[in-house]
Image (tube, rainbow, N blue to C red):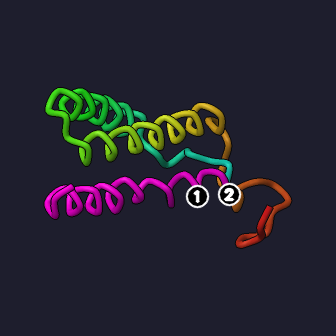
């Protein structure tokens, strides 16, 4: 691989890894109430199309980034389905703000 491919893979790692904190927050709080379905559905569709584009161009950095981003976004969407209707921990009866579950 050339240095441009390594640059692309590094950039892909950073931008794709940006989804991890949201997934961790969803898991810890068991709520996704403040997330937008429209945003995540549009983003997931765009990522899927970028993946197709990357495959058609045989671009390993683009394929890596979009396979990973698509997987993380599907996890996020799954959490949005699973935790829908859950209120934030602080808003639940019997909870003290800042208390871990």
Mark seen at residue 100 = none
Q: Identify which residue, 55 or 87, lies in the foreground.
A: 55
Question: Looking at the image, is 35 positioned above or below residue 21?
Answer: above
> How many neighbours does mark 2 have within 10 angstroms: few (below 14), some (14-19), or many (20 or more)?
few
Q: Main secondary structure of the magenta part?
A: helix
Residue 68 in the image: state x and y as whole percent.
41, 44
- Asked whether 91 falls inside the magenta stretch, the response is no
Drawn side of residue 49 relative to residue 97, left or right: left
Q: In this orientation, which residue lies closer to the viewer: 37 or 43?
A: 43
Task: Give the structural element (helix, strand or loop) at label 1.
Answer: helix
Please say whether residue 17 is one of the residues in the magenta stretch.
yes
State which region is magenta.
1-27
Say if mark 2 contacts mark 1, CB within 8 Å. yes
Q: Who's the residue at 54% across and 39% down the image?
A: 75
Quarter of the figure with residue 92:
bottom right
Disc 2 versus disc 1: distance between alpha carbons? 5 Å
How packed is label 1: few (under 14 Cα within 10 Å), some, or many (20 or more)?
few
Which of the numbered marks, if any, corresponds to residue 25? 1
- Which element carries disc 2, helix, strand or loop? helix
Residue 13 placement (x, y as % from top left)? 35, 58
Residue under label 2: 28
Question: Is residue 100 or residue 49 the one in the foreground?
Answer: 49
Q: Is residue 23 left or right of residue 87?
A: left
Residue 42 position, x and y percent, is 30, 32
Taking the view exactly as shown, the residue that stands out farthest to the bottom is 98
Quadrant for the C terminus in the image: bottom right
């Amino acid at each position: 691989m050339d240095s441009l491919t390594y640059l692309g893979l590094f950039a892909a790692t950073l931008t794709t890894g940006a989804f991890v904190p949201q997934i961790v927050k969803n898991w810890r709080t068991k709520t996704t109430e403040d997330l937008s379905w429209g945003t995540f559905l549009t983003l997931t569709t765009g990522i899927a199309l970028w993946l197709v584009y990357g495959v058609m161009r045989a671009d390993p950095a683009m394929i890596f980034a979009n396979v990973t981003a698509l997987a993380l976004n599907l996890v996020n969407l799954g959490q949005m389905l699973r935790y829908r209707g859950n209120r934030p921990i602080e808003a639940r009866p019997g909870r003290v703000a800042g208390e871990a579950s």
